[in-house]
Amino acid sequence: MIRIAICDDEPEILSCIEEQISQYGIQRKIDLSINIFQYAKDLETAVLNQTDYQIFILDILMPQMNGIELGQIIRNADKQAAIICLTSSKDFAYQAFGIYAQRYLLKPPDKNSLYEAMDFAVSNLQQRNQILYLNTADGIQKIFYHEIEYIENLSRTLHIFTIDNREIISRYLRKSFEQSLNELLENKYFIQVHKSFIVNLSQIRVYDLTQMTMLSGKQIPISKSRQPIVKRNYLKYTAESY
């Protein structure tokens, strides 16, 4: 089930979007849980109480707290949640990039635009929530893709570094580094940047031609032979995501 929060101070718009999202779930055969909020402060309280919403649809122009401010609170609580912004004005489009909004739609959004935004958000969620099963000394461990910051190959063992600062080590690899993680490398969030490193593109803080700095501060080298494809894939990822 995908949990969605919709926040708009106009009851008619709020009801309309709720109905459209409900119909979207039926048409796409996706199980959705939808909660609506007329006041940004109510959604802020839910977020701070760690209510697990995965997609947020936010009106930008609201009294007391606007959608950009609310989006910053959401982003501080959850780096991975999808945010779709709605507004009657284009003036806040630039600020929406600061909260990494995936889409910026003018109100009232037409069905096609809203469905395209939802398709993009849902596709990202499904890719992020794939699972890597890792054979370790303690048995088979299950790691969600979105939990992985980067992977290092050390002496033919996988060292999985997660966003919550865990290091999970595999048993000795019988296959090559690339073959062992072939399925993960088919996911658009991951790319091999060096013979010994695979990174999660969503966890990059700073990118330059020769290295990446991850959100944890770890610096990952980019081999010279891989620099062109890494640059191309990273620019494609940022263009599609933001």
Image: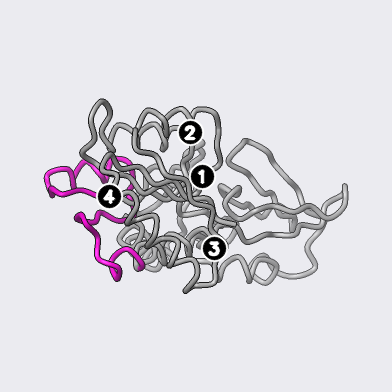
The quadrant in which residue 18 appears is bottom left
Three-letter code, disc 2:
Val
**Residue that badge 3 annotates:** 127
166 and 210: which one is in front?
166
Of the image marks 3 and 1, the number of the one nearer the N terminus: 1
Labelled pair 2, 1 in contact (Cβ < 8 Å): yes
* Distance of label 4 from label 1 (alpha carbons): 22 Å
Three-letter code, disc 1:
Tyr
Check the picture and name the quadrant holding the N terminus.
bottom right
Which x, y percent locates residue 202?
45, 51
Labelled pair 4, 1 in contact (Cβ < 8 Å): no
| Mark number displayed over residue 47 | 2
In the rendered structure, the answer to whether residue 60 lies left or right of residue 197 reads left
Crowdedness near tag 3: few (<14), some (14–19) or many (≥20) residues, C-alpha within 10 Å: some
Disc nearest the viewer among 2 and 4? 4
Crowdedness near tag 4: few (<14), some (14–19) or many (≥20) residues, C-alpha within 10 Å: few
Which x, y percent locates residue 153?
66, 55
Of the image marks 2 and 4, the number of the one nearer the N terminus: 4
Of the image marks 3 and 2, the number of the one nearer the N terminus: 2
Q: Secondary structure at mark 1?
A: loop
Q: Secondary structure at mark 4?
A: helix
| Mark number displayed over residue 53 | 1
* Distance of label 3 from label 1 (alpha carbons): 17 Å
**Residue that badge 4 annotates:** 12
124 and 84: which one is in front?
84
Q: Which residues are magenta?
A: 86-115
* Distance of label 2 from label 4 (alpha carbons): 24 Å
Of the image marks 2 and 1, the number of the one nearer the N terminus: 2
